[in-house]
Amino acid sequence: MIDIRQLRYFVAVAEEEHVGRAAERLHISQSPLSRQIAQLEERLGLTLFERSQQRIRLTRDGQTFLAETRALLTHANRLESLGKRLGRGEEGGLCIGYIENAMHAGVLPNALRVLRVDRPNVHVALYNLSSAEQLEGLRQRSLDIALVSEPPVADDPDLLGFQVLDDPMLLALPEHHPLARQATLSPADLADQEWIGVQHRQNCTSREDFVSACIRAGFTPDIRMEATEPFTALGLVASGLGIAMIQKGLSRNAPPGVVLREVPWIAFTTPLWAAWHRINLRPLVETFRKVLTEPGAAT
């Protein structure tokens, strides 16, 4: 393979048409420069220069070779610059898995906004997957970062996790519901209500966790309808079809006709974890991991 250094020497000699001036430009001695040019010609089996005592000129083949050499060196410089930017995490791509709550609560959009300020050239691919699928994607290296409802186990040999959100739950009521105007709410107030459950497709235990929290509070919810995501549940609440528990992070997106109330005696939250592979080979992944796990990243 051709030595890039020899190509740079060749261009300098071709532009100066004088070995001595080219040597000064390259900050090397004249003799080693002449030797490098001779070695390049020998490797190529091509005479690049016509030599005389006064000057050195490109042959016709040398002129053709010079044009291609300049194009190659330009590309090599761009490639070197790209490699350095990748090494600093300024460019490249990220494959990010997420559950819907990462979007609803604003964690993922906010983190991407922060990343884009300093890394505008980064390409991001987002994959809406279950937590189990995401963790497997991390193991297979098809994902760089996962946003999941449950972390990797503590002794996982491959993966690490960090909790980025523990979203409290709010009670969603139709605006004309009698409880919407009641100053304080007790478990007894909710015992005989018609509930809309939320069975998240990406978190199979969410419904069971909700029911268990209600039982601990002193009542069993009468679930008459079930939705697969919280926005559907909010729409049903707005239509007066029941009451529901939704994440606080969704409160800014509640539709008209819904009143949200705090019920701290229902000990039920929606956690969100960031997970990644223990062995990180790319600075960009580490940069985004820090953005996600810094205090305030979820706001």
Image (cartoon, rainbow, N blue to C red):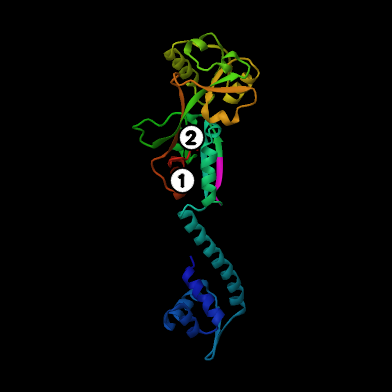
Q: Quadrant of residue 55?
A: bottom right
Q: Which residues are magenta?
A: 121-125
Expressed as whole percent of the image width and height from the top left, the position of residue 67 reads 60, 72
The foreground one among 186 and 10 is 186
Report the amino acid beneath label 2.
Answer: Leu
Q: Residue at x 36, y 33 (%)?
A: 156
Which residue position is annotated with label 1?
285
For label 1, the crowd category at 10 Å Cα-Cα, with few meaning under 14, some 14 to 19 and many 20 or more, is: many
Q: Is residue 225 left or right of residue 286?
A: right
Q: Residue furthest left?
A: 155
Q: Quadrant of residue 173?
A: top right
**Residue 150 image point, x, y percent:** 44, 29
Answer above or below: position of 98 versus 49.
Answer: above
Q: Nearer the viewer, residue 226 or 131?
A: 226
Q: Could you classify mark 2 by the number of other residues whose Cα lies within 10 Å: few (under 14), some (14-19), or many (20 or more)? A: many
In this picture, is 104 found above or below 197? below
The dot on residue 147 is 2
| Real-space CA distance between mark 2 and mark 1, rounded to the nearest whole angstrom | 14 Å
Instruction: Identify which residue, 145 or 5, lies in the foreground.
Output: 145
Residue 122 forms part of the magenta stretch: yes
